[in-house]
Image (spheres, rainbow, N blue to C red):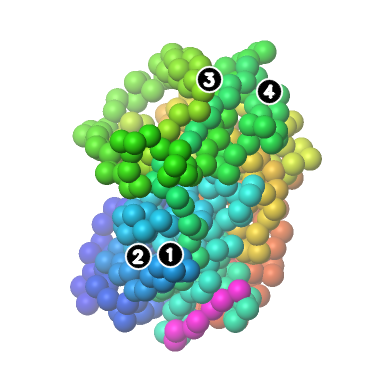
Amino acid sequence: MALLSTSLSGWGRYPVQSCELERPERFALLHPNAEHLIARGQGRSYGDASLNENGRVLLTERVNRLLEFDLEHGVLRAEAGVTLAEILEVIVPKGWFLPVTPGTKFVSLGGCVAADVHGKNHHHEGSFGDHVQSIELILANGKLLHCTPTENQQLFWATVGGMGLTGIIGEVTVKLIPIPSAYMMVKNHSADNLEGLFTLLQSPASDDRYTVAWIDSMASGEHLGRGVAMGGHHVEVEELPGNFYRSIKPERRHSIPFNFPALILNSKSISVFNSRYFKREGGRRHPFLSGYDSYFYPLDRIAHWNRLYGKRGFVQYQCVIPDATAFEGVKHLLEALSSSRRPSFLAVLKRLGPQGRGLLSFPMAGYTLALDLPIRDSGLFVLLNKLDEIVLQHGGRVYLAKDARLSSQKFREMYPLYAEWLKIKHEFDPQNRFSSSLSRRLKIGESA
């Protein structure tokens, strides 16, 4: 089979690498027929997790059928290439929703398992893997293995959060949650500094089923970490005004047609935007209705929004710091960012609940901070190395699905269950056939 070699990147558009692409049309063709390969869904991981430089990338985007939907119990079985957007179109009108969702619906179901994605409700309902009932995994020897939390459970929990390195996820069965309507009731709470924002995230009075905080990344001094906590929950039908319906028509999407010049997103422009956003969203004193799209996926309304950062792309730096040291750790991270005067267009803080069972899963009980940082020069990577040190000093770790430049030494310090994961990897993939640019950079699959 002649394969197409092309330049490929993740959503951050850094790094760009040459990969051989294979696009099977059917589940039966999802076979590890190359010496080294990695599966790729929608390519929405930010760095090099779904890249395989000078090697095979297996695209699963056409293996995207919905196979079975138990409407009574809310159980969905589907092929791994289906997107959350395609799932939502079917389940929301029927009164069901995803148990956990990341900040974009344009990700694949298999990718959600591989990255064990989390959402605004992690502190209440855990990560995606906690709601997966089974997966069909294609092993390095080509055999198909059914895995559940109780059957082949070691491989199951090595695959949940395992970044596609244990096998090809072919099918996923997930338990959904019932919802009364497609609308959210949202309440914003503003805080003038980081201490106030932490208080809001910890307080039952301002918490909700889903909670996330936006941070003004350009604020400093006494206003360091100021932001807006946004809590929301699904609205009961009887709470809706008469002209609202159970379902919502998709919102109109806009598109960024070209790469923005690098100088447009600068400290001054982002400071102005942040000040206006803080005033607008922080000034909303009363609860308000929102469609689920607007609340969960605000950036999805802008196609190709990654072009805002210019041709050189950007790095999303996401870390988690445990409860005991979270405030000091996040404070030091924001201080380092502020003093660098490197603009972050987006800064998001979420509270996470207990660590899940995925051996390489990112979440732990604490707080996660995500920063979008445009690549202007090599000085950015000096700053990111400094942020890594702060995260390690406070007992935290970096999210592999967002990473593009972490060192292998720091990876092993951040992920203490790696040795346990590696034993399972060696058992089911002794030749390390499933590998990616990320795994080689971090030396995942290699012994200490």
Give how far apart the Cα atoms at labels 2 and 1 are: 6 Å
Which amino acid is tagged 3? Arg
Q: Is residue 247 positioned above or below 29 on the image?
A: above
Give how far apart the Cα atoms at labels 1 and 4 are: 38 Å
Query: Tag on residue 285?
Result: 3
Query: Tag on residue 110?
Result: 1
Looking at the image, tell me whether mark 1 or mark 4 is earlier in sequence order: 1
Q: Nearer the viewer, mark 2 or mark 4?
A: 4
Give how far apart the Cα atoms at labels 4 and 3 are: 17 Å
* Numbered range of the magenta stretch: 143-149
Looking at the picture, how far across and down is residue 286, in whole percent? 51, 23
Looking at the image, tell me whether mark 2 or mark 3 is earlier in sequence order: 2
Looking at the image, tell me whether mark 2 or mark 4 is earlier in sequence order: 2
Query: Tag on residue 196?
Result: 4
Q: Which of 335 and 431 is in front in this view?
A: 335
Let me know if residue 147 is in the magenta part.
Answer: yes
Give me the residue at 61% from left, 53% from top: 125
Let me know if residue 365 is in the magenta part.
Answer: no
Q: In which quarter of the image is the N terminus?
A: bottom left
Whether pointer 4 and pointer 3 mark residues with C-beta atoms closer than 8 Å, the reply is no
